[in-house]
Amino acid sequence: MAYKKLFEPGRIGGLTIRNRAVMSPMGTDLADIRGNATPRLIAYYTERAKGGIGLIINEYTGVDDVDSIPTQHNLRMAQDYNVQEAEELTRSVHAYGAKIFAQLHHGGATSKSAFTGRQNLSPSGVPMAPGGEVPREMTLEDIKRVQEKFIAAAIRCKKAGYDGVELHGAHSYLIAQFFSKYYNRRTDAYGGSLENRCRFIDEIIAGIRAKLGRYPISVRICGDEMTDEPGFLTLEDGLEIGRHLEVQGIDCINISNGSSWNGNANCEPFSYTPGWKKHVAKAFKEALSIPVIATNTIKDPDFAESLLEEGVSDFVALGRSQFADPEFMNKAKAGRPESIRKCIGCMYCRERLLGNAMPVECSLNPRLGREYRYRWQDLQKNGNSRPVVVVGGGPGGLECAVILAKRGFAVTLLEKEAALGGTLNIAKLPPHKANLQDVTDVLALEARELGVTVKLNTEATPETVAALHPVGVFLAAGAPPVVPKSIPGIDKAVLAEDVILGKAPCTGKVVLVGTGLTGLECAEMILEQGHSLAMVEMNPTVGQGIFGVVFNDIYSRIKPYDPEVYTSHRLTAVTDTGVTVEDMATGETKTIAADTVVLAMGTHSQEAMEASYRAAGLNAILVGSAEMPGRIAGTTRDGFEKAWGFEAE
């Protein structure tokens, strides 16, 4: 496909954008403690500019470092000292032909008082959620002071070389709180009617225009907050705000969805179908004459092109797809869409940021946020065709093989099964997970194009590997399931992975032991097949350790079946008629009847395998889950890092 629409230049105000792809603003936590752009952050954005994106709208950029500190490492333009590093950022992006806007942000009631030491601000003192921290209602003096901070930040942005600014009026942040009938309950000039609820942003826009003239201004709003609670914005409300803002003279509008109560409508997990919310963007496109930018869970350029052809929006916003593959646009332009690493919606990026307050990372892109450290020009290409062997064709093994091949080693990958993919061949089978096949496909393509020799149906042993005379052996054989032989009758049980693969069909009532991610995905399949289910979990809660967004998504499909749940219970035996379990709080023993017992008790590492290879005199290195059982992100990162840093003995 030529992607004629996608690569057509576009206009925002007086600015020409080289194509119709806009990088969505997404938090990274890569700024320093004062909100300055770090070399790490600059390298991250530069990589996307090099990758061919037309316009970058960088992550939420604080205008206020007194009353709005959402994280300790959020980017800011709140002080004059933020300008210098921001200029380095804009110049680096411009060097590769992209344009860049700063998204100006104030958290309002979503700020963290633990960081500011002050009560949060909001239009009406309404907590973000019932029972939450109560913010302080803004006085008229507060309103004027914060508005001036937005205007001052815009002036700094122009000084730093930004091509424009975006006012963040979405996702229940301060401007959105003023828009909201739920959060804004004022009775003065800033509350009540549409005109009053928009007055806060109107005066910011007017202030920027007075200082900077026709400097491009975008506004991001939630076209539909999709929140079933009186006072949250509907599509009709959003369109009314959009029409009002167009009259104020903004240059474009950036449509998102959701609210602080419904983040899934903004950044959705894997179960959502791309384009599920395109009707919102299309309604704005039909109602307004200014350009419309919109997110739509875009994973590939074919879908992006179809949205533009359909007239859903004027520009397509690429969010997590830019995390997964910064070369998305260059690969599309070269006619190689199959080589794009496509976001799988696993939410690991959000888990890092929101769940752990750590810098952003990606399951498919081990370099995300670390481009400054792992620069392609620094990769040591000293393999000199020396042989290395990778054992295991899962994501960790494939990533490892790709980097070793880029370094010039002669790589042989041995996979005991008939197909590459490893545990992805299990993980792709539960509902809504079919896109995991894309991970295997793209990594296999990269390996093939780099000349990796792949041998399927080949069981690796120290003896067969030694015959290849490798200078290094990378053991990426995955993590076998835990089967505690000390538990009486354990051999009567079947493994969750065999149930998922269809090798061990369930009959009658099922007891599932273990409710990690694999366990819950297996539970969903068992319930859909019509079996009654009891779940046994040693932890005090089901799904402990799973990121809340992912857990809530999966459990929303399990809960309607009302399975029996035994938390804080330990499996003590498997019998011909079910299981016995022990209440870990009371020591009480219970029996649970079952026709099928399924184990999802986690996995264990492969230290014994490493020892056997080393005993054969081989330079063996455990990779990914073989060393530390975990998920795709950990195994791809480990494969990448160990291949990057490998030095033959």
Image: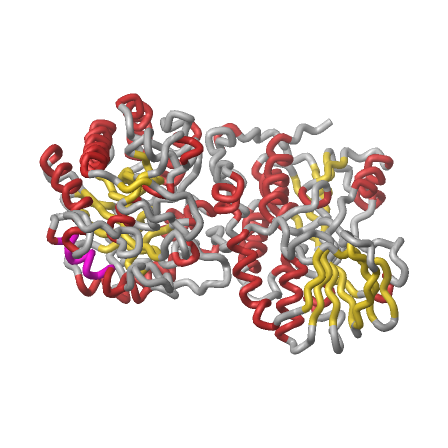
- Do we see residue 115 in this rendering? yes
- Report whether 435 appears left or right of 69: right
Residue nearer the viewer, 253 or 479: 253
Vertical comparison of 619 with 227: above or below: above
* In magenta segment, residue 463: no
Residue nearer the viewer, 631 or 123: 123
Residue nearer the viewer, 123 or 565: 123
Could you tell me which residue is drawn at 68 percent across and 64 percent down?
565
What percent of the width, then of the height, locates residue 313?
26, 59
Magenta stretch, residue numbers? 238-246
**Residue 622 falls in image quadrant:** top right
- Report whether 44 appears left or right of 203: right
Could you tell me which residue is drawn at 33 percent across and 59 percent down?
225
Residue nearer the viewer, 365 or 447: 365
What predominant SS class does the magenta segment belong to?
helix
- Do we see residue 58 in this rendering? no
Could you tell me which residue is drawn at 87 percent across and 56 percent down?
487
Q: How is the image coloured?
A: secondary structure
What percent of the width, then of the height, locates residue 433?
56, 62
What percent of the width, then of the height, locates residue 21?
31, 50
Q: Quadrant of the N terminus?
A: bottom left
Q: Quadrant of the C terminus?
A: top right
- Report whether 67 appears left or right of 497: left
Could you tell me which residue is drawn at 29 percent across and 30 percent down?
77
* In magenta segment, residue 241: yes
Vertical comparison of 35 with 280: above or below: above
Q: How many numbered discs? A: 0
Vertical comparison of 629 with 261: above or below: above
What percent of the width, then of the height, locates residue 639?
63, 41
